[in-house]
Image: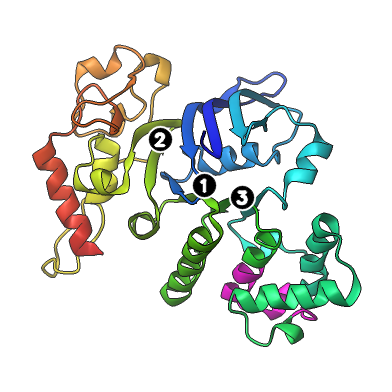
């Protein structure tokens, strides 16, 4: 059995007097122990709201959840607040996207780290402070004893992100959700944080759900990749087959838009035209059709289903998938750009 099994997850936002908004519809994926699973897509495709639903952090009012999310035999979506509070931090934890807004600006770092140790591990006083300093040292923060007394604004962006990681791994959770953990960080700090996450997975056997729009992060870290568009999984495969032959036009476009280091000066990029707002309802056809270079009238004949057109285990939601030759060209561009 997988550590986390998400089955047909749906998230709908409701408001009196307004039309319901479906943010996620029918999303399914698994995360095994010691596995890194990626959720990839543009902003607004449903990645972050999926993670918030799994962590029980969505508001109770104005949100309607459907489907199941089984974590080691426990159904997360139906847990009470108290039971979910007991699980967060101890069994599953999350690294949020913006460390400056995720940390309390008026509370020292040490207090925020030791709070987790007190709540879930029963540690107090000097023992908790020593463990907090050890956690900061583990994630590469220099002079951790002094940093415990400092406030978030006194730390650099990389240090704040490392402090969030220290808080997330304080109780050695079995599942870690990382929501864009390298956003707004320079490439050197990004590489260090990704290496740290990889070590946690390898040494602790933690399952990692990586939420990102950075395909470079996916290429270097993820084992299984799920590409989301407009709240649905449009392609799912292991990392190497996906990069070798992206089959959905959206995945093909994401890979094809990566700049090449060996490209001649002045060569134009190949972005996906339009924006995430240029879409149709899934009930009317493929939501990506208005932006798709492979669009046919068959794309408007109803919701396409996930199928395996070319290889077992490589699923795609498209009635006119990209041919392997065209997909290979996108993969060559990605390899050169990396």
Assess whether residue 141 is covered by the magenta stretch: no
Identify the image quadrant of the C terminus: bottom left
Q: Is residue 103 left or right of residue 261?
A: right
Question: How much space separates mark 2 and mark 3, taking CA atoms?
Answer: 28 Å
Return the disc, 1 or 2, that comes first in the chain's sequence. 1
Look at the picture and state if 338 lies above or below 79: below
Q: Is residue 92 left or right of residue 121?
A: left
What residue lies at 67% left-to-right and 32% top-to-bottom?
Answer: 74
Look at the picture and state if 71 lies above or below 287: below
Quickly name the residue at label 1.
33
Whether residue 289 is visible, yes or no, is yes
What residue lies at 58% left-to-right and 57% top-to-bottom?
Answer: 97
Quarter occupied by residue 70: top right
Front residue (pair 202, 136): 202
Quickly name the residue at label 2.
229
Quickly name the residue at label 3.
174
Question: How much space separates mark 1 and mark 2, taking CA atoms?
Answer: 26 Å
Look at the picture and state if 84 lies above or below 173: above
Specify the segment rendered in magenta.
148-163
Dots 3, 1 in contact, CB < 8 A: yes
- Mark 3, secondary structure of its residue: loop
Q: Is residue 42 left or right of residue 335?
A: right
Quarter occupied by residue 317: top left
What residue lies at 38% left-to-right and 44% top-to-bottom?
Answer: 224
Q: Name the spot of residue 161 as percent of width and height, x first.
A: 60, 68
Q: Which mark is residue 88?
A: none
Return the disc, 3 or 1, that comes first in the chain's sequence. 1
Dominant secondary-structure state across the stretch colored magenta: helix
Question: How much space separates mark 3 and mark 1, taking CA atoms?
Answer: 7 Å
């Amino acid at each position: 059995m997988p550590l986390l099994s998400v089955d047909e997850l749906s998230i709908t936002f409701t408001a009196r007097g307004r039309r319901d908004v479906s943010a996620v519809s029918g999303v399914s994926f698994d995360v095994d122990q010691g596995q890194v699973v990626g959720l990839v897509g543009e902003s607004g495709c449903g990645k972050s709201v999926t993670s918030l639903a799994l962590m029980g952090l969505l508001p109770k009012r104005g949100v309607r959840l459907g489907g199941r999310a089984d974590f080691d035999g426990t159904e997360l979506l139906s847990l009470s607040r108290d039971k979910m509070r007991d699980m967060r931090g101890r069994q599953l934890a999350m690294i949020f996207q913006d460390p400056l807004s995720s940390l309390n600006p008026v509370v020292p770092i040490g207090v925020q780290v030791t709070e987790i140790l007190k709540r879930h591990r029963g540690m107090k006083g000097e023992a908790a402070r020593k463990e907090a300093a050890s956690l900061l040292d583990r994630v590469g923060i220099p002079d951790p004893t002094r940093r415990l007394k400092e406030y978030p604004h006194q730390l650099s962006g990389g240090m704040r992100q490392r402090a969030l990681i220290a808080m997330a791994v304080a109780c050695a959770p079995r599942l870690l959700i990382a929501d864009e953990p390298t956003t707004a960080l320079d490439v050197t700090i990004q590489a260090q944080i990704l290496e740290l996450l990889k070590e946690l997975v390898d040494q602790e056997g933690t399952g990692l759900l990586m939420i990102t729009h950075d395909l470079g992060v996916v290429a270097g870290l993820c084992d299984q990749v799920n590409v989301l568009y407009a709240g649905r999984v449009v392609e799912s495969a292991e990392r190497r087959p996906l990069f070798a032959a992206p089959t959905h036009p959206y995945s093909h476009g994401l890979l094809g838009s990566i700049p090449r280091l060996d490209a001649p000066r002045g060569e134009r990029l190949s972005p996906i035209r339009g924006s995430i707002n240029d879409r149709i309802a899934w009930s009317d056809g493929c939501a990506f059709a208005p932006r798709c270079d492979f669009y046919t009238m068959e794309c408007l004949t109803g919701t396409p289903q996930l199928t395996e057109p070319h290889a077992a285990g490589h699923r795609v939601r498209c009635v006119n998938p990209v041919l392997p030759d065209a997909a290979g060209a996108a993969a060559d561009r990605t390899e050169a750009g990396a």
